[in-house]
Image (cartoon, helix red, strand yellow):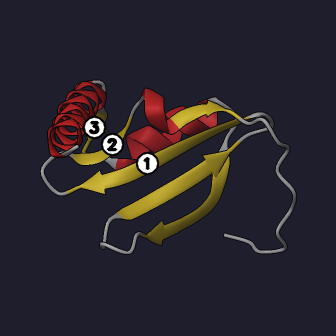
């Protein structure tokens, strides 16, 4: 039982580390937020909301008719996004009654 648990923990650690490293290598970062926002506007997306995560990371969430994009701030690299933070919505966005 202990050996099985140890193997399972090692597998999860190795898999999550590899997965995280692969995702980080696909990140696109730039210090200039305006450059990202120009590209996002070109996709027809608008800022839905901006906020700060519980651990203090600023982020911005954009939506279009059927797509979404998210940017987050990395102190070492600037504003970042990547394939894991962009995509197509499976549920239409309902107006929340709040403006940005």
Q: Are marks 3 and 2 in contact (CB under 8 Å)?
A: yes
Residue located 30% across and 73% down the image? 56
| Label 2 Cα crowd, 10 Å radius (few <14 / some 14-19 / many 20+) | many
Q: In this view of the protein, which residue sits in the foreground, 59 or 17?
A: 17
Q: In this view of the protein, which residue sits in the foreground, 6 or 39?
A: 6
Q: Position of residue 84 (x, y in %)?
A: 46, 33
Of the numbered discs 1 and 2, the one sitting upstream in the chain is: 1
**Left or right: where does residue 38 sit relative to residue 27?**
right
Residue located 48% across and 70% down the image? 51
| Label 3 Cα crowd, 10 Å radius (few <14 / some 14-19 / many 20+) | some
Q: In the figure, 67 relative to 55: above or below?
A: above
Q: Residue furthest front?
A: 1
Of the numbered discs 3 and 1, the one sitting upstream in the chain is: 3
Would you identify the image quadrant in which residue 27 lies? top left
Q: In this view of the protein, which residue sits in the foreground, 27 or 6?
A: 6
Q: In the figure, 55 relative to 36: above or below?
A: below
Q: Secondary structure at mark 3?
A: strand
Would you identify the image quadrant in which residue 42 lies? top right
Would you identify the image quadrant in which residue 54 lies? bottom left
Q: Position of residue 36 (x, y in %)?
A: 43, 40
> Which residue lies under the disc numbered 2?
80
Residue located 17% across and 57% down the image? 75
> Which residue lies under the disc numbered 3?
29
Q: Position of residue 43 (x, y in %)?
A: 64, 30
């Amino acid at each position: 039982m202990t050996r099985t648990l140890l193997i399972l923990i090692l597998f999860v650690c190795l898999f999550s580390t590899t997965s995280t490293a692969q995702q980080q290598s696909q990140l696109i970062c730039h210090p200039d937020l305006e450059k990202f926002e120009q590209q996002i506007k070109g996709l027809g997306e608008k800022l839905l909301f901006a906020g700060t995560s519980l651990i203090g990371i600023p982020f911005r969430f954009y939506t279009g008719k059927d797509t979404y994009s998210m940017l987050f701030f990395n102190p070492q690299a600037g504003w970042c996004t990547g394939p894991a933070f962009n995509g197509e919505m499976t549920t239409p966005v309902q107006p929340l009654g709040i403006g940005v």
